[in-house]
Image (cartoon, helix red, strand yellow):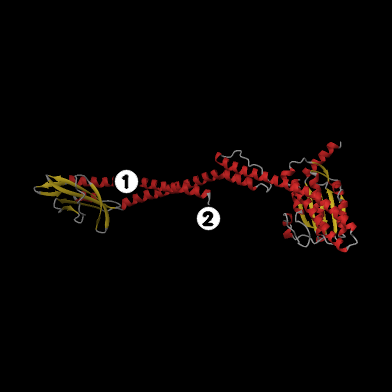
């Protein structure tokens, strides 16, 4: 079971509060019921003293001088039955109820002493009073049933239960609110981290954060800083390695071309050099893609200055290379280029275009058609790069996966699975959207890179500034 700070706080706060409320309720009950019990006992004691006033010594005989009317008044009670008795020192009943319970050991002093007992099947509350009449000790007892006491006791209990329930609910609400408010800064930190993109390694803002969270945020920021530094070093290493590999690979390919030209009459040598040149081409392409990945890294991109880039001219520079690659597979490639400019990094945008067209050529079959377009949409101010083919297309289920690094749709086609990943990274770096859908007539694939009005608007402003 996953540990929870909220659960622990609630447990350690609510449990003591409930226990304290229970103890408080018990004490309040005792404080409320005790005086009520004493008051009722005092009423019984007053009745016992009143009976004492009516006890007379007639010669050597003790009698209770109580009229019938006075006895009726003594016994009349709306809720309880009342009992009384007067006994001599030997325990003989002088007057009253003969089945009144015995007094011992409650008559050790000449004070009315309350006690619990029974008369028949009835539970009673009684008081015993020891007195002397003419030097003769006697015992006087008065008792009543418990109906009134239980009613009072019930009212006290119900009032306490209602009060304690209200207090417990209020305490729980206060504790829950306090814990939630106390944990809110943690939720803020979580939300801040959740909203970040995977490549955002900037420090977490500690502004308005409580002092207790500062050490945690310092640790998180320290970790982010180390990861950011490691990422930059890794990307720098990757860029250095890719850059260092390009020169020897280009030289190796040149030597292979020279060897192939000299030994073209030898079929075995020609076949071997052809295979080596194909391998060299793959290595050169993968090296260029690694360099493109290093360039597209946000930490690297931020170090470069954005400049005005004329996309149509940038694409014209690569047309010859695209045409040559397409001719190798008898692919018909066409260009529809409208003048359009955006703010961006020229090298990254060139890498993005190269990977888009190369990916279309690579996955299109012989005799396919590819259209490369640069569109300046005056209606919404957006600039779009569109590469469309009529090849096998990309299944809808795989359209998100193709932007993952090293994902390949088919093992039959040579490639590293980095092309569209590079396109996605460069587009993100330029705040451009990548849309992948089906080509014309429901066949093939169309990849659209859309630069928003803001990006295109900055390029227009810069263009106007340089060309009044």
Q: Residues within 10 Å of mark 2 (few under 14, many from 20)?
A: few
340 relative position to 80: left or right? right
The residue lying toward the viewer, choosing from 29 and 286, is: 286
Task: Report the number of discs.
Answer: 2
The residue lying at 77 percent from left, 60 percent from top is: 394
Front residue of 66/361: it is 361
Could you say whether the residue bearing mark 2 is in a helix, strand or loop? loop
In the rendered image, residue 397, in percent from the top left (x then y), is placed at: 72, 60
Side (left or right) of 161 relative to 219 = left
Q: Which mark is residue 465?
A: none
For residue 383, say whether it is visible: no
Q: Secondary structure at mark 1?
A: helix
The residue that appears at 59% across and 43% down in the rendered structure is 219
Q: Quadrant of residue 186?
A: top right
Which residue carries the number 1 mark?
A: 34
Which residue reaches farthest left? 59
Distance between mark 1 and mark 2 Cα atoms? 48 Å
Answer whether residue 52 is visible to the viewer in this image. yes
Instruction: Name the one closer to the observer, 72 or 139.
Output: 139
Residue 8 location (% of width, % of height): 50, 49
Front-lying residue, 169 or 414 = 414
């Amino acid at each position: 079971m996953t540990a929870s700070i909220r659960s622990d706080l609630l447990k350690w706060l609510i449990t003591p509060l409930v226990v304290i409320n229970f103890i408080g309720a018990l004490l309040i009950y005792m404080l409320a019921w005790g005086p009520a019990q004493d008051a009722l006992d005092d009423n019984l004691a007053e009745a016992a003293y009143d009976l004492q006033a009516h006890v007379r010594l007639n010669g050597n005989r003790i009698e209770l001088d109580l009229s019938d009317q006075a006895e009726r008044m003594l016994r009349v009670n709306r809720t309880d039955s009342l009992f009384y008795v007067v006994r001599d020192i030997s325990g003989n009943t002088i007057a009253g109820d003969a089945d009144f319970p015995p007094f011992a050991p409650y008559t050790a002093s000449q004070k009315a002493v309350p006690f619990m007992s029974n008369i028949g099947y009835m539970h009673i509350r009684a008081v015993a009073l020891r007195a002397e009449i003419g030097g003769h000790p006697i015992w006087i007892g008065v008792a009543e049933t418990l109906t009134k006491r239980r009613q009072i006791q019930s009212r006290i209990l119900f009032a306490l239960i209602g009060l304690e329930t209200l207090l417990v609910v209020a305490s729980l609400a206060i504790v829950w609110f306090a814990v939630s408010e106390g944990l809110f800064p943690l939720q803020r930190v979580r939300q801040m981290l959740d909203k970040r993109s995977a490549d955002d390694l900037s420090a977490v803002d500690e502004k308005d954060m409580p002092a207790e969270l500062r050490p945690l945020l310092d640790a998180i920021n320290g970790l982010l800083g180390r990861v950011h530094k490691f990422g930059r070093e890794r990307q720098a290493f990757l860029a250095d390695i890719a850059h260092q590999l390009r020169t020897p690979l280009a030289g190796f390919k040149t030597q292979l071309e020279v060897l192939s030209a000299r030994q073209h009459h030898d079929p075995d040598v020609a076949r071997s050099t052809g295979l080596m040149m194909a391998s060299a081409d793959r290595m050169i392409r993968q090296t260029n893609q690694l360099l493109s990945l290093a360039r597209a890294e946000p930490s690297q991109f931020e170090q470069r200055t954005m400049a005005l880039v004329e996309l149509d001219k940038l694409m014209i520079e690569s047309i010859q290379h695209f045409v040559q690659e397409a001719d190798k597979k008898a692919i018909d490639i066409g260009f529809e280029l409208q003048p359009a400019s955006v703010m961006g990094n020229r090298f990254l945008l060139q890498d993005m275009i190269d990977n888009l067209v190369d990916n279309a050529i690579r996955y299109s079959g012989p005799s396919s058609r590819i259209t490369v377009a640069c569109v300046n949409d005056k209606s919404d101010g957006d600039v779009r790069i569109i590469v469309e083919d009529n090849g096998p297309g990309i299944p809808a289920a795989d359209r998100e996966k193709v932007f993952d690094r090293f994902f390949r749709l088919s093992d039959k086609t040579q490639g590293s699975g980095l092309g569209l990943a590079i396109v996605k990274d460069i587009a993100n770096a330029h705040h451009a959207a990548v849309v992948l859908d089906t080509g014309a007539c429901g066949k093939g694939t169309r990849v659209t890179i859309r630069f928003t009005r803001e990006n295109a608007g900055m390029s227009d402003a810069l263009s106007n500034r340089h060309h009044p």
